[in-house]
Amino acid sequence: MAVKILPSADVDSSAVIGDGSSIWHLAQIRDEAVIGENCIIGRGAYIGSGVTMGKNCKVQNYALVYEPAKLGDGVFIGPAAVLTNDQFPRAVNTDLTLKSGSDWDAVGVTIGDGASIGARAVCIAPVTIGKWALVAAGAVVTKDVPDFALVAGVPAKRIRWVGRAGVPLEEIGNNLFRCPQDQSRYRQVSENELVAESI
């Protein structure tokens, strides 16, 4: 399938865009970024230098994915969400001279397969968001998020478990959970670990 890049998008010539992907109006894809197959980059979204993204990802309008973020397959980034890359941000050095690229070390956010980041959520690097996790809209993630966790709030905390379908799981006893949508089952093996029993 052909790549679709709107004329107003700014895609660096060194970026790699996978087959079937679409880059919409005013999006910017920086140098050395790698976008997988069948991805959608929404209007005004920013993908930083060297960011890697798996296949079938969606980055919604005005989301900011700063380098060196790494996104797995099937990741959803909601509208105006931000993945940061500077632990100690300053515009200037201690003598008030403007910082350059060599004055700081970029650290990235890592997101596992199937995970979703809600609208206007902020993920503070260098956190890792687990596979199939769900970050609620407006949350501020300051710590790693386990696989299948639903986190919300400022700072974000786990409030439920979710399955691959993205809906909250129902507890059915003996540390077992069931997805009400597809009936898949999961087992909680510790306070912060849930594993799929059947998919």
Image: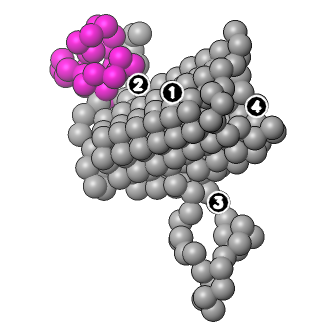
The 10 Å Cα crowd at callout 2, few under 14, some 14 to 19, many 20 or more, is some
- What residue span does the magenta drawing correspond to? 162-190
Looking at the figure, which quarter contains the N terminus?
top right
Q: Are marks 1 and 2 in contact (CB under 8 Å)?
A: no
Rendered position, 92 above or below 166: below
Q: Which residue is pictured at 66% across the width and 85% down the height? A: 97
State whether residue 97 is above or below residue 125.
Answer: below
Q: Amino acid at mark 4?
A: Val
* Callout 4: SS: strand
Q: Residue at x 51, y 27 (%)?
A: 58
Please name the amino acid that badge 1 sits on.
Lys
Where does the image place residue 52, in percent across and percent down from the top left?
67, 37
User: Is residue 186 rendered magenta in the image?
Assistant: yes
How far apart in space, not on screen, are marks 1 and 2 (Cα)? Answer: 25 Å
**70 and 19: which one is in front?**
19
Q: Position of residue 63 (x, y in %)?
A: 48, 42
Which residue occupies 46% across, 36% down? 61
The amino acid beneath tag 3 is Ala
Looking at the rendered image, the quarter that the C terminus falls into is top left
The quadrant where residue 80 appears? top left
Asked if residue 36 shows in the view, the reply is: no
Residue 185 horizontal side relative to residue 92, left or right: left
In primary-sequence order, the first of circles 3 and 2 is 3
Badge 1 or badge 2: first in the primary sequence: 1
Q: CA distance from mark 2 to mark 4?
A: 34 Å
- In the rendered image, which residue does mark 4 sit on? 16
| Residue that numbered label 1 is attached to | 58
Residue in the image at 53% along x and 40% along y: 45
Query: Which of the two labelled residues, at mark 2 and mark 4, occupies the earlier sequence position?
Result: 4
Q: Which residue has dot 2 on it?
A: 195
Q: How crowded is the residue under tag 1: few (<14 C-alpha within 10 Å), some, or many (20+)?
A: many
Residue that carries the numbered disc 3 in the rendered image: 106
